Amino acid sequence: MKEQTLRYIADLGSYIRMLWHVIKDLASVRLPWAPTRQQILNIGLNSLPIILLTALFTGMVLALQTAYGMQRFGAKMYVGNVTSLAMIRELGPVLTALMLCGRVGAGIAAEIASMVATEQVDAIRVLGANPIRKLVTPRVAGAIIVMPVLCIIANIIGIYGGGLMAVLELNLSAQSYYNSILQTVLIRDLVDGLIKTTIFGFLVVSIACWKGLHTRGGTVGVGNTTTSAVVTGSVVILISDFFITKFLLLL
């Protein structure tokens, strides 16, 4: 038990050291822009279909469940208020991050783990290059840039899905649904959601990169690393969501 605790502490220290190097690279003007642009396309464009599908059906089922509960109190007309606020402040950022973790996090962890297993990362070090700047920083920068965009798209599609259910199933007018959103959602709500999404993107991709760089066990270790990256990233998202939300509400 003591050895396992010490190993966890050592892993945490190694992860923090990697984050420190990444933050220094992000703050410098020497950011590798060509790989970063490639990562923006990979993370953003390729993740868009699953983000759209998830957001659409989340908004639809959220509207149905909200109406089912509120019609008991004669408050079915407030379905737009609840759906829009829940999507923008909570479900949009969290679901976008979870989908990114399942798709992009697993891919990044597997890619870097394969490079470690085939000694490509060692070759980068031998050539005098920094593996963190070459492999980690572009991916983290790409996630930070593209995650807020994905979150905004998910919010729009989720609210639109809720509107479809409000009009087709709940017999509400599109105008009343739209007006309820305008009366409820504030700029502060949108900003808080985007802040959470940016932090989630940073955490998910950095964890996947760290897991990949510390792969052990050859090709078998690649599979274990991929699974560990997805599980760890998902748990970190859910835990950090509480603390970020609590902090933002205190501001």
Image (cartoon, rainbow, N blue to C red):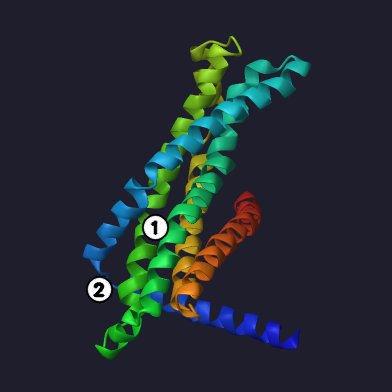
Picture coordinates of residue 241, whole percent (x, y): 61, 54
- Residue found at x 48% / y 79%: 214
Picture coordinates of residue 49, whole percent (x, y): 39, 40
68 relative position to 205: left or right = right
Picture coordinates of residue 55, whole percent (x, y): 50, 36
The reply to whether dot 1 and dot 2 touch (C-beta < 8 Å) is: no
- Residue found at x 56% / y 66%: 228
> Which image quarter is the N terminus in?
bottom right
Q: Which mark is residue 30?
A: 2
Mark closest to the chain's N terminus, 1 or 2: 2
**Is any atom of residue 49 visible in this view?**
yes
**Residue 234 figure quarter:** bottom right
- Residue found at x 54% / y 63%: 227
In what element is the residue under mark 1?
helix
In what element is the residue under mark 2?
loop
Vertical placement of residue 192 versus 88, above or below? below
**For this rendering, which residue is in front, 98 or 70?**
98
23 relative position to 196: left or right = left
The residue that disc 1 covers is: 143
192 relative position to 243: left or right = left
Structural crowding at the residue carrying mark 2, measured as other residues with C-alpha within 10 Å and reported as few (<14), some (14–19) or many (≥20): few
Give the foreground label among 1 and 2: 1
Q: Amino acid at mark 1?
A: Ala
Vertical placement of residue 211 versus 153, above or below? below
Q: How many marks?
A: 2
3D distance between C-alphas at marks 1 and 2:
18 Å
